[in-house]
Image: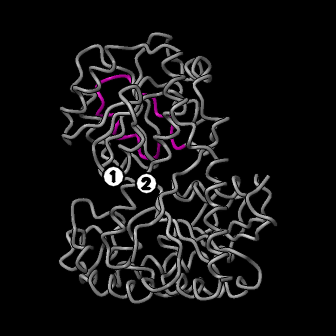
Amino acid sequence: MTLSHRPLRIAILGKSNHIGGGASKVSELMLESLIGLGHSVDRFTVHKPPTDPGGRSLFGPRVSRAIWLIHSGCRGLFGGEFLPVELPGLRDWPSQYDIVHVNDHFVSVSPWTIAWLADRIPTVLTLNDSSYFTGGCLYPYECVRFEIGCGQCPQQGSMRMPVDVTRPSLLLKKSLLRERKIALLAPSQWMADQAALSLVIPERPEVLPYGIRRHIFHPGRRKAAREKFGLGADEKVVLIGASSLADTRKGVPFAVEAVNLLPEPRPTVLLLGHAAESLKRILRTRSIDVGFLEVEEDLADVYAAADLFAFPSLADNLPLSVIESLACGTPVICFDRGGTPELIRSARDGEVLTEVSASSLANAMTNWLQHLPASDEQRQSIADATDTYSLERQGRDLIAVYERMLHARNR
């Protein structure tokens, strides 16, 4: 049964599929949740990977590559994807769809394109990062200049921006997007609060958390997963994971140093993600490089096999990896940064550290590892607390948003 009296025609627009990162994976999960409710959904990617059976590419590989280069160049020069080179692929959408949901727009969709869509068709946008309402950065960290108009950007160098254009970039987004009727969704309370402070967004976005495939991520995989990775039944195991372990935003060096600070015997470390080679040389303990895993069943085995997930990210929205770990019954230790702490709802689920340091992380890990192994009942209790992060709930919430947009447009 669906909330709609008729199946809606929905287009989801994003950057890539799951190999493009967590935000791109969300597009796949949205598609599944909406189709499960009986709606007609097409998922489009601006940069289609070689294998993406559930997605449709706006363009062929050569055009897609050209658009990627243009948008990437524009971000350095203008602080955003300001040339709407993807717009020709969308020109027929107002007659084909009831709703367009723009997801994972970073380096794929220009604000000019979003404005064009919003003028012609009910448009929803998910704030998977902060780039929609800043002068160009994905996350402002401790910077608050996006609240007053940007400029003098502390991330100018890391964004490869030869001239600081963050202020005109932010003001252009404001002029294009602030008065458009766009339904903005934020996966976390933290992201909604950040967005509400920006000059671009007139009111606080609605919070709609992600959903995951809970039939895949569950604690029951633990015994087989441990055998799969050659782990002993009583062996203590810490997971360190990110799409890229070299991404400084993920804070992986804090986790590596923390493990090295632990007393002997140190736990075995599972390294999940790209660029694990250098970390294996630094870690002073046994480590297993499981690589970047595309198959969710393999990913779930990694979470289920671990006793603890060290996730010292310095800025994240509502990371799928943390939700998936908790759904597998594996507690998480994180810093009090971004939206991640919202997922640690009780002392059973993990720990949120106010001090951002390797020593604070090491102390917390020591305490948790001393109380292992957790019982099957404890792991199931952690998993049960994530029931709200289901595809079914996500789909129902999305349809409620879409129908409000359609009602407002018709009225």
| Rendered view: 381 above or below 11 | above
Where residue 207 appears, as percent x and y from the top left, is 47, 58
Any magenta on residue 258?
no
The residues colored magenta run 273-292
| Rendered view: 10 above or below 214 | below
> Residue, x 33% and y 52% (percent of image)?
338
Where residue 248 appears, as percent x and y from the top left, is 31, 52
Quarter of the figure that contains the C terminus? bottom right
Residue indicated by mark 2: 188
Where residue 216 appears, as percent x and y from the top left, is 65, 35
Spatial CA span between label 1 and label 2: 9 Å
Mark 2 closeness class: few <14, some 14–19, many ≥20 residues within 10 Å: many
Mark 1 closeness class: few <14, some 14–19, many ≥20 residues within 10 Å: many
Residue closer to the observer: 385 or 136:
385
Instruction: Find residue 269 and report its image quarter.
Output: top left
Circle 2: residue type: Ser
Image side of residue 367 versus residue 373, left or right: left
Any magenta on residue 277?
yes
How is the structure coloured here? one colour
> Which mark is drawn over residue 338?
1
> Residue, x 43% and y 49% (percent of image)?
244
Circle 1: residue type: Gly
Number of numbered markers: 2
Q: Are marks 1 and 2 in contact (CB under 8 Å)?
A: yes
User: Which circle's residue, 1 or 2, is located before the other in the chain?
Assistant: 2
Where residue 325 appears, as percent x and y from the top left, is 49, 34
| Rendered view: 223 above or below 157 | above
> Residue, x 47% and y 43% (percent of image)?
273
> Residue, x 64% and y 62% (percent of image)?
400
Image side of residue 345 versus residue 229, left or right: left
Instruction: Find residue 344 and report its image quarter.
Output: top left
